[in-house]
Image (tube, rainbow, N blue to C red):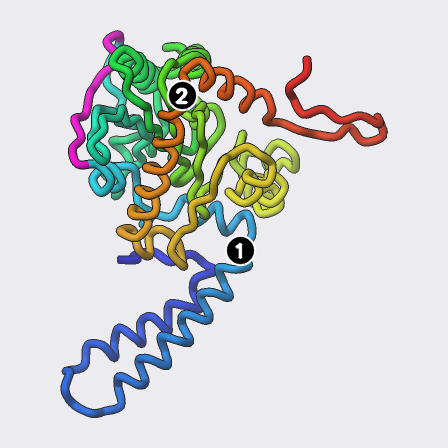
């Protein structure tokens, strides 16, 4: 159920409220209600298609951060037959911003590692709004090494504004923890499948995002910096320039697919995943099953070579006026 509406969704609110009001009338009496409801629903559907076919980068960013958007905990519950959560980095403590553990998916065992933002204000505070500390990344690292030891594929879900930038996190080695994860994932001798389900921010996202396949939900985002952060740096105003920055960053799934950063865009229900979470989970289940089957058929040495080449290819650009182009794979 949608509890929160974004600014650009406001034209839909009046129609949805009217439909709900009419549906509460007693059934069985011929007041022409069914025909009236049908016409309103058709109008609502047309308006929704019109709105969601012309979204800006900033509007997609708002959808990726939507309060009602399904979180990792929902997908874990819907996608897997069982899930045994494992806690702690065995060095400092447990970080609730990252959840991980062994799960069963279509009869096969997976190691699942995910950012968890929280579904209400209290849980958001407990989960630190999905912003991990170093111990969260070290927990993820421990679980990835466990998966490698038992030869189980790794599935990661990205949904974070970024790694927590607090003093304590820096004192405990935030940058080192992220860098170590990147190095380990580059050499991990099991398939890695990554899903960007909401907000993918900076190194905090990439620390569990170096997958053999990277899939993004249609209204998710993935970027080196937030639109507000980019605008604050470039124009000294994080609010006024955020819409321009969101478009310039090319952070949407469609943009990133065209740039070769991700491997597939998973279409969301009309209006976003929060409109029909069950349907979204089924779409994810099909994509996960298909990609895991493909990855598990590849020889592990070839898989590591492909993973290396995949990330070396990211970052194609053209130097204007220099007369040459590079794809990021040459020194």
Residues drawn in magenta:
81-91
Q: Which residue is mark 2?
A: 166
Q: Residue at x 33, y 28 (%)?
A: 155
- When the figure is inspected, residue 323 is found, relative to residue 143, above or below; the finding is below
At 55% across and 59% down in the image, what residue appears?
Answer: 54
Residue 300 in the image: x percent, y percent? 40, 16
Examine the image and state in which quarter residue 215 appears. top left
Q: CA distance from mark 1 to mark 2?
A: 34 Å
Q: Residue 26, how many percent across, how many down?
A: 14, 82
Residue 103, quarter of picture: top left
Picture coordinates of residue 41, whole percent (x, y)? 35, 75
User: Is 69 positioned to the left or the right of 301 in the image?
Assistant: left
Residue 298 vertical placement versus 121 (above, below): above
The kind of secondary structure element at disc 2 is: loop
Image quarter (top left, top right, bottom left or bottom right) of the C terminus: top right
Q: Nearer the viewer, mark 1 or mark 2?
A: 1
| Residue density around tag 1, few if under 14, some if 14–19, many if 20 or more, within 10 Å | few
Tell me which residue sits at (30%, 53%) in the image: 279
Q: Secondary structure at mark 1?
A: loop
The residue to which callout 1 is attached is 55
Q: Is residue 271 magenta?
A: no
Q: Quadrant of residue 123?
A: top left
In the picture as drawn, the residue positioned furthest to the top comes out as 91
Q: Let me know if residue 164 appears in the view.
A: no
In the rendered view, tell whether residue 261 sits above or below residue 169.
Answer: below
Secondary structure of the magenta portion, mostly?
loop
| Residue 261 makes an appearance in the image | yes
Q: Earlier in the sequence, mark 1 or mark 2?
A: 1
Characterize the local packing of mark 2: few (<14), some (14-19) or many (20 or more) Cα atoms within 10 angstroms: few
Would you say 78 lies left or right of 254 here? left
| Closer to us: 156 or 1 | 156
């Amino acid at each position: 159920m949608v509890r929160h509406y974004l600014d650009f969704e406001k034209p839909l609110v009046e129609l949805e409220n009217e439909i709900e009001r009419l549906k509460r009338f007693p059934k069985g009496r011929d007041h022409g209600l069914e025909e009236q409801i049908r016409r309103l629903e058709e109008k609502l559907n047309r308006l929704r298609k019109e709105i969601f076919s012309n979204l800006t980068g900033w509007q997609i960013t708002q959808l990726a951060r939507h309060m009602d958007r399904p979180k990792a905990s929902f997908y874990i519950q819907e996608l897997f037959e069982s899930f045994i959560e494992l806690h702690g980095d065995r060095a400092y403590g447990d970080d609730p911003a990252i959840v991980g553990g062994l799960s069963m998916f279509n009869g096969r065992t997976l190691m699942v590692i995910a950012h968890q933002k929280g579904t209400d204000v209290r849980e958001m505070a407990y989960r630190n709004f999905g912003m991990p500390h170093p111990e969260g990344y070290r927990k993820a690292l421990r679980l990835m090494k466990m998966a490698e030891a038992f030869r189980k594929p790794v599935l990661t879900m990205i949904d974070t504004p970024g790694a927590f930038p607090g003093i304590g996190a820096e004192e405990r080695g935030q940058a080192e923890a992220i860098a170590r994860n990147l190095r380990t994932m580059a050499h991990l001798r099991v398939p890695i499948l990554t899903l960007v389900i909401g907000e993918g921010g900076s190194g905090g996202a990439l620390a569990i995002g170096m997958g053999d396949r990277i899939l993004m939900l249609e209204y998710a985002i993935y970027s080196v910096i937030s639109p507000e952060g980019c605008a604050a740096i470039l124009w000294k105003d994080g609010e006024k320039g955020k819409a321009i920055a969101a478009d310039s960053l090319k952070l949407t799934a469609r943009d990133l697919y065209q740039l070769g950063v991700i491997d597939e865009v998973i279409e969301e229900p009309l209006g976003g995943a929060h409109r029909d979470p069950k349907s979204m989970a089924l779409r994810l289940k099909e994509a996960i099953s298909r990609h895991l089957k493909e990855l598990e058929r590849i020889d592990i040495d070839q898989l590591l070579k492909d993973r290396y080449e995949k990330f070396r290819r990211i970052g194609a650009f053209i130097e204007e006026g220099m007369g040459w182009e590079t794809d990021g794979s040459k020194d």
